[in-house]
Amino acid sequence: MTFTIARLSTLATLPTEIFENIILLLSQHDLTQCVRVSRAWNEAFTPHLWRIIPLFGRTRFKRFMLPDTQGELYKNTAHVREIQVKHEKLYNLFLPSRRLSEAILSDAEPALSDNAFTIGPFTNLRVLELHHRPLARAYEFDEGIFEIVRQNPGLRRLKIGVEMEPEVLLSLVTEHVPNLQELDIETPWRGDVKALLDNLPDSLRTVRLKDVNHEIPWKGYVSSTSSATKRRPLQHHALESLHIGGNLAGQEEQVLVPFLEGCNQNLKTFLGTTRVICFGANWTHIDLFNRCVGPLTAAAIVNNCERLEVLDIMESGTWGLSGSHLQTILTKAPRLRSLQVRWLLGTEKISSVDILSSEWATTSLEHVDLKIHVPRITADQEDADDDDSKALRASSRDIQRQVLRRFGQQTHLRKLVIGGMAYSSATGEFGHQLECLEMTLESGLNELKGLKELEHLDIHDMDHRVGVPELEWMVANFPKLKHLHGMHCSLRPPNEGVQEWLHSHQPKWSCVCVFTGSVL
Amino acid sequence: MTVILVSSDNQDFKVDKEVAERSILIKNMLEDVGESDSPIPLPNVTAAVLTKVIEYCEHHRNDPVQVPEETDDPRKRSNDIEEWDMKFMQVDQEMLFEIILAANYLDIKPLLDVGCKTVANIIKGKTPEEIRKAFNIVNDFTPEEEAQIKKENEWAEDR
């Protein structure tokens, strides 16, 4: 067995795959200790130590800029796969450094560019992430960044959090990163968004443009022939996720529609603060916070909602998505988990008719935020004893019960928000919801007994009738309830005993009054 | 059904087929050979090591077959070794490495993983001197050389 002792003498003589398996389990700090153990270990571990250059924090950055480090960097640039820099002095990496040239000249190496980062060019980069806090205009180091990217056509992930000249960035992204899979532009980018989108590399899987400001090129609006780019057939089949924020200057259709049409194959997630009118059948998330949803968009959503899991459109639009659209979505989207359309129906709440007209396809709803219209009787009719009033009362309560039964079937429901002010066509004003669920036991509250996961119930600004029996029922049936909003701002004085009950029972929920913000 | 495995030093090991097939190499061999009874030679594994490997496979005979995980983060963790496995790996270093090599040759991924995690855990958190002691390695750097290396790579240390 003597040969095994010799084999043992360095871990570094294990077969490569095994060695690399072990390396993956070690932190970069561990590797700094390993390279000091012996010559053999140094040789085996050094390439792995230099795989990732993460420069966060002042100490690390300062040490990195020392001549000794730079010298070692120079020898190991071929091993570097990832560079992540987040430091306000990022530009130091791209400005000439006198100490640097000295270090290199002393080795009698041929004179290279003075730039720290272009020393012995990185050629095997897969990931480049650059951030800094914008302290000063920094176009000076565009060239340095450009150089690194240009020398690394193998880049897979590029995250730019520094301001760059729009033309430079455009050229960079559309011409020099043919294998890019992830693109993340954090800083505001002002330029021709259409040219950018039309010419993105086909290999992209994820694109995030946090804050764009579309500018139609001054040459005239045919952006596809701008000098830096040429038009190619659109085929972003690999794209799975697109986030685009900012302002498309009213050009959403021209900019986004052709792009989205070209990449609907795999696109699953779209997040935008822009108006969009094109969706693909594979979409699972639609999140359009703060934007109007027009009729075309609404139709597109409804036509493509089979895989929809999340529909979040919280905007005070008065046109577009209507109650009947929502009804269709409820019957067509079996995977729907989150339905947040609270402000959407500014003039129109979703009516009980729409909710009840057919069974819902989903039983996985976890989060619902919308307003529901149910017919209610007037205050006089409430106490009246004549047959007509009784019939109306019974009919209203029956409808409410059925609505609540629908919700009661959503046993995963955690957050139910049906409160909030609504526009009333009767009064022509915004105000409390008058024709809304009473949320009493008589009108079907107990249909919700299956909602054991419910954590949050919001019925504020509603003319509800929750009283002590209802509160006791909730304590007994909603074991996970943490928040109940709406006990202090109903239209009429709270039901008898409610204040005292809340005070004496101190349920573990918080009960917030929206107006005064006071918490019980 | 049992199979016979033969170590490099010519010792026979009779093992249940189900246990032996934890090794993908052996599994494939058995599929090729069919119903034959002939023993399977393992020229790269000594009896001592094979004993340990079989012990591992016996204990884990009912484990579900691992599906390779496709996560974006290639960095793995080493702090999730089962207690039995941990005790199993308390062997001298020579045997530890032999087990790793055998697991690699026989294609028993879970055993290979445990072996690698064990080695990684020996290294983690140690200074160079402590690592040398743990692996019985002679320091062939001069103090100046070692200091220089430390300086060059200090940026990557945790502080």
Image: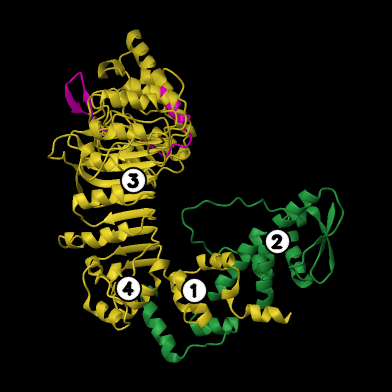
Chain colours: A yellow, B green
Amino acid carrying mark 3 in the image: Val
Which of discs 4 and 3 lies nearer the camera? The answer is 3
Q: Chain of mark 2?
A: B
Q: Pick whichever, A372 or A83, lies toward us.
A: A83
Q: Of the numbered discs in the image, which one, if any, rests on residue B106?
A: 2
Secondary structure beneath dot 3 equals strand
**Is label 2 on the same chain as label 1?**
no
The residue carrying mark 3 is A207
Sooner in the amino-acid sequence: mark 3 or mark 1: 1
> Residue farthest to the bottom?
B143
**Is label 3 on the same chain as label 1?**
yes
Query: Quadrant of the image for the N terminus of chain A?
Result: bottom right
| Mark 4 and mark 2 residues within 8 Å of each other at the beta carbon | no
Sooner in the amino-acid sequence: mark 4 or mark 3: 4
**Residue A291 point in image, percent of width and height:** 24, 34
Q: Of the numbered discs in the image, which one, if any, rests on residue A60?
A: 4
Amino acid carrying mark 2 in the image: Leu
Secondary structure beneath dot 4 equals helix
How far apart are labels 2 and 1 at the CA level? 26 Å
How far apart are labels 4 and 3 at the CA level? 30 Å
